Image (cartoon, rainbow, N blue to C red):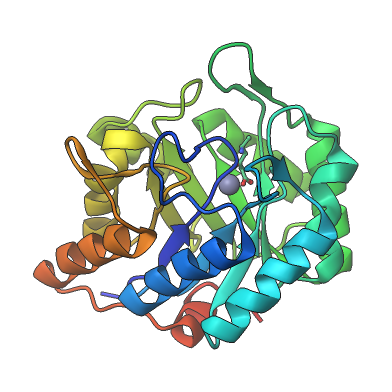
Amino acid sequence: MEKLVITAAICGAEVTKKHNPAVPYTVEECVREARSAYNAGAAMIHLHVREDDGTPTQSKARFKAIMDAIREACPGIIIMPSTGGACGMTDDERLQPTELNPEIATLDCGTLNFGGDDIFVNTENSIKNFARKMQARHIKPEIECFDKSHIEQALRIIKSEGTITPPFQFNIGFGVNGGIGASILNFGYMRSALPEGAVYTATGIGRHEFPIAMLSILDGGHVRVGFEDNVYLSKGVLAPSNGALVEKVVRMAREFGREIASPDEARKIMSIN
Ligand code: KMH
Ligand code: ZN
């Protein structure tokens, strides 16, 4: 089977040091967490950034400072900035990291409840606008889908716009509060909706992180783990670092004969040029 690409979502926008004191806010903390994931086998970092006090921001300057520092500490690593940001941010605010021309960035393909009163808004026109802007800058979109309807929305835009072109890279997420639940049946349901030839990463939220990783390892998909999605190594045991979460996936993959992709191998697998 193809080598396994591990993405580490090291920071997120919602999780805080109250959930796990190792959640990174500062430049130095982001570098520490990225390095731990890279040394453990992550080929890609999915990046959100914060101010030093933990406030999520999509500031271009803050992204640049942290991306530069991570690149220096982790030679060759793929950095995939978020264009999702945090709930309540405007589209222009969210798009700022694309001005740095990253090789890949997230493209969220549907609106969903996001817990409590929060709604993560991605209208059809917003998604089209994000896709157009990313195509103009030759940024590969990772198509983020937290429900089957998001895959169907992405496919409609692929068909009508020509701004998202094959080979496609999807991230299918399970267990977001407001998104599709995490189960074997739902994994198959989402998986079966992906277009022929698509490459995909799977993400499970909270306690679903490792079961979903296992399904993806067995199915030939790729895996995302990290503090953005889950702060525990096992029930009641906080992960000391993002690297510890990646190490667990590496152990699982090796048990089932999947070798781990380097960043350059990941670029080939995911057609990131
Ligand atoms: N923080 C969420 C509201 C992405 O990075 O593209 C959105 C998110 C998705 O995390
Ligand atoms: Zn994210």
Q: Is residue 262 above or below residue 190?
A: below
The image quadrant of residue 252 is bottom left
Residue 182 x/y as whole percent: 32, 31
Q: Is residue 108 left or right of residue 77?
A: right
> Where's the C terminus, which quadrant?
bottom right
Q: Is residue 47 left or right of residue 211?
A: right
Q: Is residue 209 above or below residue 34?
A: above
Q: Is residue 1 above or below residue 239?
A: below
Outermost residue on the left side: it is 255
Decide which of 114, 17 is in the foreground and name it.
17
Look at 23% across and 68% down and name the residue there.
250
Residue 149 seen in this snapshot:
yes
Look at 83% across and 59% down and name the residue there.
60
Residue 194 seen in this snapshot:
no
Q: Is residue 96 left or right of residue 200?
A: right
Residue 17 x/y as whole percent: 47, 41
Look at 41% across and 45% down and name the residue there.
21
